[in-house]
Every structure is written in structure tokens, then in C-alpha cells.
Image (cartoon, rainbow, N blue to C red):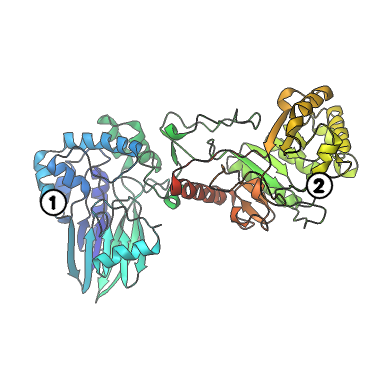
Amino acid sequence: MRIAVCGGPYGNPYALQAFVDDARARGAERLFCLGDLGGFGAEVDALWPILTSNDITCVAGNYDVAIARGDTDCGCGYRDPKDNEFAQLIYDHTLATTSRDFAAWMGELHTERRETIAGVDVHMVHGSTLALNDFWWESLPDEQHRQRAEASGAGVILCTHSGLPWQRRIGSALAVNVGVLGKPANDGRHDVWYALLDLDAGQATAELVPLAYDWQAQARSMRAAGLPEVFVETIETGWWTTCLEILPPAERSRGRYHLYRSTLPTGFQPADDGWGPSSAPAPHGDRPVVPLFGSPYFPSRLWLYTNFHCNLACDYCAVASSPRATPRTLPAETFRGLVDEGVAAGFTELYITGGEPFLHPDIVQLLDYASSQLPTVVMTNALLLRGRRADGLGELADRKLTIQTSLDGATAATHDLHRGNGSWTRTIEGIRHLIDLGLPPRVALTETPENTAEVPDVAALLTELGLPDDHFAVRPLLRRGFAETGVEIGEDSSIPELTVTADGLHWHPAGADTASSPDMHLAPAGTPLEMGKQRVTERFFTARLSDGSLPSPIRCAI
């Protein structure tokens, strides 16, 4: 026997009728609905004749129980105040516009249904086998899946409530979240989802079916009812714009929007967080949600490591670069491809670093290409700015190119303590040379116990050389790579800065060495940047939700 099972019509009669028509056309002999008849759309009463005239067997969801009793809220199970605020808006509309006759009909529904169909023990619930409003997410740990399956003991368990369809085998049981009809599955599609199950001789298979319907009519009806545009936008775009905080990290990372605007920090912003001029986050209208990417929590700057070998052996290098380091050089063609990919993925700045980038044989050509596409910053110790590799550097003075170097003391004795004898003098010469080329550099000082007292003197020295005040900043020593002391940095304590090396994608440029920072490695070489953004988003929320704290920027550049 073939059965069709839907969840959450949410006041969307257009999708419910499409479900009936599509399921019948696919040979479904029985139709079921797992509840939540109201909850997003405007026309709840229009569902009733469709349900009854097509013999759709229903179980009650939390919404139906609440409407039947006239409760003050939907009992959806949200925990975040903003999620509950949006849920309350639509519940108030549903309660006010649902006829009491239909509400009474809802009140007669059972909150679960169990029957044997073609030899298969089928258990139908709304949220899960544990609770009416339990969110049975696909990303739950295996133990939690087993707990829900064992609480039933059925061969097939059907649920909804979360709004996101999935299926999996849990021991001998087949669990299927059938999705909902009332809104898209946060996947950028207009389609909604339901499930078809084939049951025969005690065996069961399931198919999740995308369902096209008249979403334009649904959007018009919601606007006509005066529902907030933020709800209508989900129908029109396929992306969720409300009730985001309930989503676990894996599910949240797949959507377009990840954060309520009200949760964005006021303490640091891309334009004034000490990193220098930066593009503002991409505009997202006046909607209450924004993507993580492009926000202060995940700036739209892309870091590219051209190589890892260096002409210096600084004893606190966070990525363990030195003359003996394996070069791990990015080929020029790979570099150019990453720049193009970065533009397509929405990055607004490029930071080029190493090792020492000017050891790359094609560095000037790479900087030429990069700065023709996006504002580009290259990090260098300024010791290799003459000779064959640097030929043509001065011709880039009119490009969107910034050169940044390091000066760790006002005297050679202090600077050379960590960076090697003679490096202070050559760095000063490099700064002067860049000024002469029309490329006045930005300068960063890595603060150590030995140079803290010299910070004002370094600033004064740079002023004497002719650099503006905003071309100097102090950054912390990080305990990574060669550094045995300094600020601890990890993905649970820093905002992400997507970084690409020959070894793949990394959480942050300070953790780009796989040997000393394996915890910050995100994905192998060749992983698309869009996938990297998704993995960063998932790991960000995993860290954030584990303790509720929010990270701060760790500055590797001005």
C-alpha cells in the first residue's frame, strides 16, 4: 500500500490541495496529516473542507491543541524571546481568525496515531515520540535518535514540527520527518515537502517529495490579511526569516539567514574594530535577520596564504614559518582561481600572507591580479622588496593595494630580539622604500613584554618617517605555532576569518598551520569557498550554543 503523509499545512490551502492532487496522481491510497493546521499562513478555515472532502486522517499538533483550547500561545516549544515574539504574532492571528467550529473539530483529534498498515507497525506523531512539541532534528546525536525510536518501538515512525524533512534508519525502525506544507524548508525553493511511503508485507520504504503549488496565491492571501512582510518573504524566497534560534548549528548553516539583527554586537563593527577601513556588511533591507557571513561575527575578508617558508625565523610566529618550513606554495593559477571564487562568494576584501609572500616567484603578478578584483592587503616583513621578485611593485601604487609590515620595537635591540639580528634596520629601509614607491605601508607591532614600553616610541618613529597615525596598530601575541606564551585563540573564542592555504580551509589566519593548529582546519584543499562558509557557520554556532557566549575579534592585521 502506498500512503502520503504531510505535516504543518499552516493555513496554506493552496499547498494542501496540491498535496492531495499530487499524492493521488502518484498512487497514494490513503492520506494523512500530522498536525499544525495553523501557524504561518492566513487562511486556516479554508483547510477544513479540503481535509474532510478528501478523507485526510489527521493527528493533532501543538497548534491544534492550543487553538481548540483557546490557549494564550501556541506551545511551539521555542526558547528564544525573538522566536517567541514571531510565533506569538502569527498565533494571535490564527486564534482570532479560526472559526470555533473548526477549532472544536481540532479538539477532537488525537495527538498520535498508531496502526498496522500492510503488516507494518506505523506510529504517527507530531513532534516526536517524547513530546508533542519536541523538535526531532536530523542532526541530533545518534543516542537521541535511538531514544526517540525506542520510546515508540514501531517499525515506522512519522513526525513533523521542525519543518525540515529527512529520513533515516534507526536500528530496525524507519524514521521519517515528512516536512511541512505551510512554508518552504529553508532551502531557497518555493516547493514544500511531504512523504510517500510504500508498505508491503511488513516492509517499508519512504520518498520525500518536493511539491510545487501556487505560492504566489499564498503570498497574496497573507498580504491581504495584513501579516508581516517577514512571513511573506519566506513564501516568496524559500528562506526562513523568523524563528531561527531554535535551529541547531547544522540546520542553521544551510539557510541564508542565521542571526537576528538585534543580536549583532555594538562593541565592535567592521569599520571601527581596529582593522582599518573595511567594507560594511552587505545590506539586507529592514528584515530582522541577517547572514552570519558579512556580519561582525564573520567578516567578508578572505585570507590567502601564498606560501609558508620565510626569510626570517621569528620565535613567536603563529604559523611556524621559517626558512626551514615546507613552502606549501599556492600555484599562481590556483591563486587566481581563489580570487575569482572569492568575488563570486561575496568576499569584499583579500588579505595575502605567508610565510613571506615575497618569496613567491609570481608575487607581484598575483598582487596585480588580486587588487584588480578586490581591495587587497599583503603582509610582508619588508625585507625583500627589491630585486627580481619585486619588479613592478611600484606600478601597483594606483591599485586597491595596501602593504602591511611589522615593526616590533623602536630600537634594533628590541625588534631583533624576536625577529633576528639586522632585521630592524632592513625593515626601516623597506618602509622608506615603500613610501618612495607611493605605497606607504601600514605597520603593526606584536606586543610582547619586551616592547610594551616602546609602543609610543614606535608610533613617534613612524610619524617621523611620514606615515599617518592610522597606519599603526598594536596586536596581541598569540599562543600558536612557535609561540609558547600569549593570548589563547580557538574557534570558541575568536570570530572566524576564512583562510585558504595549500592544505585547505582554516578558521582563522593565526591557525593556518595544520601541524600546530589542527583544530582550526576546516576542510581539505579544493573545498569550495561556499562550502567553507557553511562549515564556518556551523562551527560558529556549535561553539556559541555550547556555552551561550559570543566571540571577539583577534587581530592579525590592522
Q: Residue at x 41, y 32 (%)?
A: 287
Residue farthest along the right direction in this orientation:
387
Q: Mark number for residue 143?
A: none
The amino acid type, in three-letter code, at marker 1 is Thr
Location of residue 106 with respect to 396 vertically, above or below: below
The amino acid type, in three-letter code, at marker 2 is Asp
| Left or right for 520, reference 410 | left
Q: Residue at x 40, y 40 (%)?
A: 237
Residue 521 seen in render = no
Residue 274: x %, y % from top left = 64, 31
Rounded to the nearest whole Å, what is the CA distance between mark 1 and mark 2?
72 Å
Q: Nearer the viewer, residue 465 or 448?
A: 448
Q: Nearer the viewer, residue 328 or 52?
A: 328
Task: Indicate the secondary structure of the residue bearing disc 2.
Answer: loop
Which of the image's four quarters has the N terminus?
A: bottom left
Residue 515 seen in render = yes
| Left or right for 115, reference 485 | left
Label 2 sits on residue: 362
Give the quadrant of residue 67.
top left
Label 1 sits on residue: 52
Residue 220: x %, y % from top left = 29, 34
* Mark 2 nearby-residue class (10 Å; few <14, some 14–19, many ≥20): some
Task: Indicate the secondary structure of the residue bearing disc 1.
Answer: helix
* Mark 1 nearby-residue class (10 Å; few <14, some 14–19, many ≥20): few
Give the quadrant of residue 475.
top right
Location of residue 112 with respect to 472 vertically, above or below: below
Which of the image's four quarters has the C terminus?
A: top right
Residue farthest along the bottom direction in this orientation:
201
Query: Which of the two discs, 1 and 2, labels the residue nearer the N terminus?
Result: 1
